[in-house]
Image: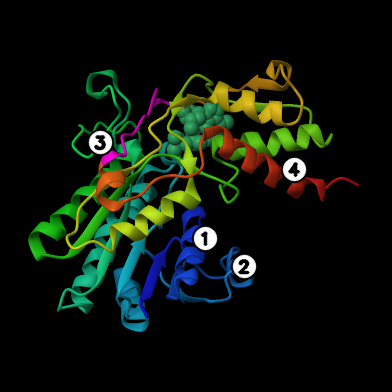
Amino acid sequence: MKTALITGITGQDGGHLAQLLNEKGYTIYGIIRGQNNPRRKEVEAEFPYVKLIEADLTDQSSLVRAMMEAKPDEVYNLGAISHVGYSFKDPMVTMDITGKGVLNMLEAIRLTDPENKVRFYQASTSEMYGGTDYNRPEKGYNESSLFHPRSPYGVAKLYGHWITKNYRESYNMYAVSGILFNHEGERRGLEFVTRKITNAVARIKLGLQDHIELGDLWPKRDWGYAGDYVQGMWLMLQQDTPDDYVLATGETHSIEEFLDIAFNEVGISDWRPYVKQNPAFMRPAEVDLLLGDPTKAETQLGWKREVDFPGLVKLMMEHDLELEAKNVK
Ligand code: GDP
């Protein structure tokens, strides 16, 4: 039976991946950061089978110790400052964790695994493409498209992407990057626009709040379901040779379209009276449109997403209606 070490175990993808690997019979270690991490109890309650190790992506010696304790076959580096908007406010910390953290993890593997047995997955992102007109291919971004990140987050992730490739080429490591387009679901944090919307719409329906404040509504994203995407991560580590893959749905939708479906689910056809625009949620540089081309993952890995765009909004709405119903007195 295999052993996996996951950084970012408290995040959305960490949860989905822990579930998947547990179903597959893995022994799972999760790295958790900081004294009295407020998420620790939640992780322990929801994933009692995950063994937690205290370590930090900015502290390389702690990662070496984590490697020595877990002795993993596979390492999934999902830990990051992952919010694009926040990365403009804290670009240095974003670089330290989201960028240099990848190098710290790769070095920890190299130091503790001289026989090159460990397989490494790096969580790369569609934010590396930046959605600028000049580099936007018609069918969507694929593995050979140009990068032009438009946020400190995207720039830091691009460093992580290239250093992973560099370690693969330099040291013959099985190190791969999954370039994942936006993936959402019931575990998504409320700071991301999809979950912010489904949670607010549920609360509006239940009389718990009367409006939602958002930034720009025209940007388009290729939104998939996180539960489908962790399958792809696992598949990337099961191949004969390491390579990078895009995971996406191949469709792009605006925030307005997301609002249409979410409000429709609770019987509201005109959402405009409930939505206020607040410049605080707009970004210094915006990514207009993201669309991914998952052909390589579909043909070479046999990966295919199962949840479509309306299905994603519906499952998030159902979850938040049930969750928020507990707050109705
Ligand atoms: P991202 O694609 O990784 O930046 O994911 P987000 O869910 O944070 O943002 C998706 C898009 O929604 C971006 O174009 C944001 O500018 C836009 N957006 C509009 N209003 C909001 C808001 O209130 N919160 C967030 N997070 N994004 C918003």
| Sequence-first disc among 3 and 4 | 3
Label 4: which residue? 321
Residue designated by label 3: 142
Answer few, some or many: residues within 10 Å of disc 1's Cα (few below 14, many 20 plus, some between 14 and 19): many
Q: Quick one: label 2, few (<14), some, or many (20+) residues within 10 Å?
A: few
Are dots 2 and 1 in contact, CB under 8 Å?
A: yes
Marker disc for residue 46: 2
Left or right placement of residue 178 versus residue 165 in this view: right
> Residue tagged by mark 1?
15
Image quadrant holding the N terminus, namely bottom left
CA distance separating discs 3 and 4: 36 Å
Q: Which span of residues is magenta-colored?
A: 284-295
Q: Amino acid at mark 4?
A: Leu
Q: Of helix, strand and loop, which one carries label 3?
A: loop
| SS class, disc 4 | helix
The answer to whether residue 202 is magenta is no
Residue drawn 48% across the image and 25% down it: 253
Horizontal side, residue 61 vs residue 205: left or right: left
Q: Amino acid at mark 3?
A: Asn
Nearest to N terminus: mark 4 or mark 1:
1
- Disc 2 to disc 3: CB gap under 8 Å: no
User: Which of the two discs, 2 and 3, sits closer to the camera?
Assistant: 3
Q: Nearer the viewer, residue 50 or 230?
A: 230
